[in-house]
Image (spheres, rainbow, N blue to C red):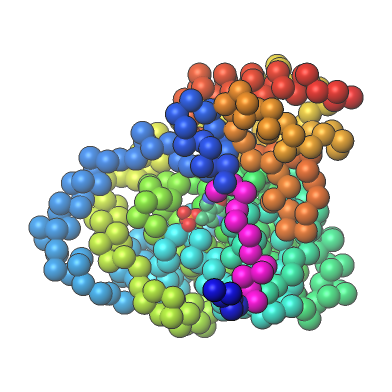
Amino acid sequence: MEYKLADRMSYLKASEIREILKVTERPEVISFAGGLPAPELFPIEAIQEASNRVFEEEGYKALQYTTTEGYRPLREWISNRMNKRWQTAFEPDNIVLTHGSQQALDLSGKVFLDQGDIVLCESPTYLAAISAFKAYGCEFIEVPTDNEGMITSQVESILETQGNRVKLIYVIPDFQNPTGRTWSLRRREQLVKLATKYEIVIIEDNPYGELRFEGEMLPSLQSFDDVGCVVSLGSFSKVFCPGYRIGWVMAHEKLIEKYVLVKQGADLQCNTMAQMVISKYLELYNIDEHIDKIRDVYRQRRDAAIEVMEKEFPKEVKFTRPEGGLFAWVELPTHINARVVLEKCLEKNVAFVPGGSFFPNGGNENTLRLNFSNMPVDRIKEGLKCLARVLNQLNIT
Ligand code: PMP
């Protein structure tokens, strides 16, 4: 049968990462490809205890439908924590819980984007945000980024010329996926000023902000926002576990109403049990102690990765030194294609994601992303030494 699909299906293609991840399921493969947290750090016993308590104390409630906005005690916890971190004054009513921040991205597309609208994003940016927004028929303008984040003078000139077609500015200011970079304070402030002046919404996606290994925490874009132009997305995936699929949108109430409307059409509400178990865990345990453990382990893994790259990569190869998060980014000389490097690495059972797919408008095939959260130090070293050997055998200069 010839299926008559929606036009949007022609904008979408299978994610390259998902294809590579199939290969990495083989146990012998050393994979820098996914973005998975370290499973051995999931607080399984504590979650089991929290879950038993939910069943015993409020089992009927946990198995029932709940509101679209989500379980109020959990929204209270999130608003309190964010207000403390960012010196903001949000209420639980400024939050809607979502199935991961991934759903929040899709709902953002549904709320804001019409066919032909423009989204400004960092170059490169998060692959699955590209897919989420693309489904709504938007185009992307990639804004060049440097070590301080998006180059805001470029944002201004784009807004001057294309202002009325730009609907969203999508950014990941902390330990960005895929580069691991963190924005400077002044760029954060400047972007919010521009968004305020041109009345454009910024989607600030921040699943990694709590995973800082060193240095000072920087304020969220939302803490500079006086007019409600910043929508922040958060997630329990990287600080707790991704399997429950709980994240959130925090924004001005007028916008939260819109997100609630589209979420009703998408899935009515988040999984009640997951929301209540997370909330019970937060009541019974100290999540900061747990996050400290994650940071310690990831810091060691980052250090191991940087050490090998510094010692063994050819000197023409550039890479980021992230202060937190899960990823580092590698730039090869422009004539080297990372997909060719990947093929050679896969023969030796080492995998990573070529960077080209993180650029919505293509190009940049000389880049690649390395995840360092999901493997012990010895595997990280072995895998990167292998990548270094492959790079050293190429005609790199
Ligand atoms: N945004 C970014 C930048 C991410 O890297 C990820 C996951 N890798 C997500 C959103 C989605 O995460 P989740 O849905 O698990 O919260």
Q: Which residue appears farthest toward the left when viewing the image? A: 56
Residue 200 seen: no
* Residue nearer the viewer, 283 or 362: 362
The location of residue 136, given as percent across then percent down, is 63, 74
Quarter of the rendering containing residue 144: bottom right
The location of residue 336, given as percent across then percent down, is 82, 34
Left or right placement of residue 360 versus residue 53 in this view: right
Q: Which residues are magenta?
A: 7-18
The location of residue 248, given as percent across then percent down, is 45, 64
Residue positioned 51% across, 36% down in the render: 24
> Quick check: is 382 in the magenta stretch?
no
Residue positioned 85% across, 25% down in the render: 396
Quarter of the rendering containing residue 335: top right
Image vertical order of residue 126 relative to residue 65, above or below: above
Rendered-image quadrant of the N terminus:
bottom right
Residue positioned 81% across, 23% down in the render: 394
Quarter of the rendering containing residue 11: bottom right
Left or right placement of residue 104 versus residue 55 in this view: right
Rendered-image quadrant of the C terminus:
top right
Residue positioned 85% across, 23% down in the render: 395
Image vertical order of residue 368 relative to residue 76, above or below: above
Left or right placement of residue 271 versus residue 265 in this view: left
